[in-house]
Image: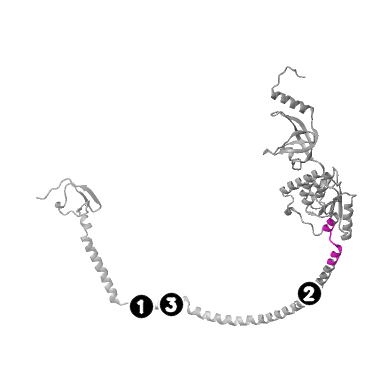
Amino acid sequence: MHDSDHIYSVSQLCRETRLLLETNFLTLSVEGEISNLSRPASGHIYFTLKDSKAQIQCAMFRGQLRKAGFKPENGHRVKLKARVSLYETRGRFQLIIDQMASFGEGALRQQFEALKNKLSAEGIFDDDLKKPLPELAKKIGIITSSSGAAVHDILTVLKSRFPALPVLIYPVAVQGDTAKHDIIAAIELANERNDCDILILARGGGSIEDLWAFNEEIVARAIHESNIAIISAIGHEVDFTISDLVADHRAPTPSAAAEMVSPDQQQWLSHFNHLTQQLTKNITKGLSQKQSLLSQLQHRLKQRHPCIQLQMHAQRLDDCQARLAQTPQHSLRRDKLRLSQLSARLLSNRPNQQINTLQKRLSTLQQRFPAPLQRRLQQARIRFTDCNKGLEILSPLATLSRGYSITKRTSDDAVVKSIKSISVGDNVNIQLFDGSLKTHVDEINQKT
């Protein structure tokens, strides 16, 4: 007990009260009717829970609200699991809600619609996600109660329509708390084994509570994630579950599901008989064509028989031998004639004969060469010698050899003939007999 003389602030009093309530009242269950419901932008909800005699404020945060499975509305009767607390800011007694569930069949219908809308928004029900049924399944898997009427109905229909079709039964509970987990485990096992072409999820009719395992969200998601096509055959034709919506195909009854996956053996027998006739006809036609082709090949083979080929080659060999016997004689005569022609040409073109002919022609020309022409040539030689001697006497080189020289201006290479044509300071070249000198004019003396 606190001292009665202790003075509390308002906030202290509210805090102490909240702690006292939360300490003494743990999670508890409360039922009542929702009123004054508000939904702020935060996603939380606030409402009043009431009965005929009292009411209390409640708060449910959005994390817990998403787990409710339905959308609370004013007037709904609900069952809550909540913690007692106090909203200190206003000093208001309230419940903090952890779980919420609706009461009775109406509540189940609300949960059904809420889950249906949720999964529809995710696109799980879309037709383009539905897997097709195989034309002829190799094995059928049935997920249902092993003692229920549904499995009996399915097996009866399969036996009457197509008894050769193998069936594998996955026994599960189809109602109660464990049913949803059994169904999920069976679907996962069938996918893991992967020895069935299609699965039938079935049970007989019943109330919405009896069929509720097939309205569970985890069951719907297991059906959606299955790699094997699933037919949902739950209850009677008027019954409808979430499993029917998410499954790849829906059958109004378990018997109808059996008809969907099994061919009619009478139709197949009729089809097989038709195929047998077609096959027999095609084989007969094919054999006839092959027989005709065989006859043609035998005829061609006779024409190409080795004996016939040997006879043809033998005749050709005889012909070649006869032609070969005649060919050397003809070639010999032709070669002899050509040899005679070449010998005659060789004799006419011998070098010795050509040399003799040229020698005779040279002698004749020498005899015909005139003597006066020879004398004129001798005189010309003498005249050439005299002229050459005279030229040497008149040559400037001969004059230079006697001590004379030739002087030229360096600037224009002109011969200096007079002192008037040169000035002091000019450069001159002096040509001697055996070379030249380059000199500078320092002084000019004129002859008096």
Residue 227 seen in render: no
Between disc 2 and disc 1, whose residue precedes?
Answer: 2
User: In the figure, residue 61 lies in which quadrant?
Assistant: top right
| Helix, strand or loop status at disc 1 | helix
Residue 213 horizontal/vertical position (percent): 82, 46
Residue 30 horizontal/vertical position (percent): 80, 35
On-image quarter of the N terminus: top right
From this view, report whether residue 234 is shown above or below residue 320. above
From this view, report whether residue 37 is shown above or below residue 332. above
Amino acid type of disc 3?
Answer: Asn
Residue stretch rendered in magenta on the structure: 256-271
Categorize mark 3 by other alpha carbons within 10 Å: few (<14), some (14-19), many (20+). Answer: few
Amino acid type of disc 1?
Answer: Leu
How far is the residue under mark 2 from the one under mark 3? 95 Å
How far is the residue under mark 2 from the one under mark 1? 104 Å
Furthest toward the left, the residue is 448
Whether residue 12 is in magenta: the answer is no
Residue named by callout 2: 289
Residue named by callout 3: 356
Residue 142 horizontal/vertical position (percent): 85, 52
Amino acid type of disc 2?
Answer: Gln
Residue named by callout 1: 365
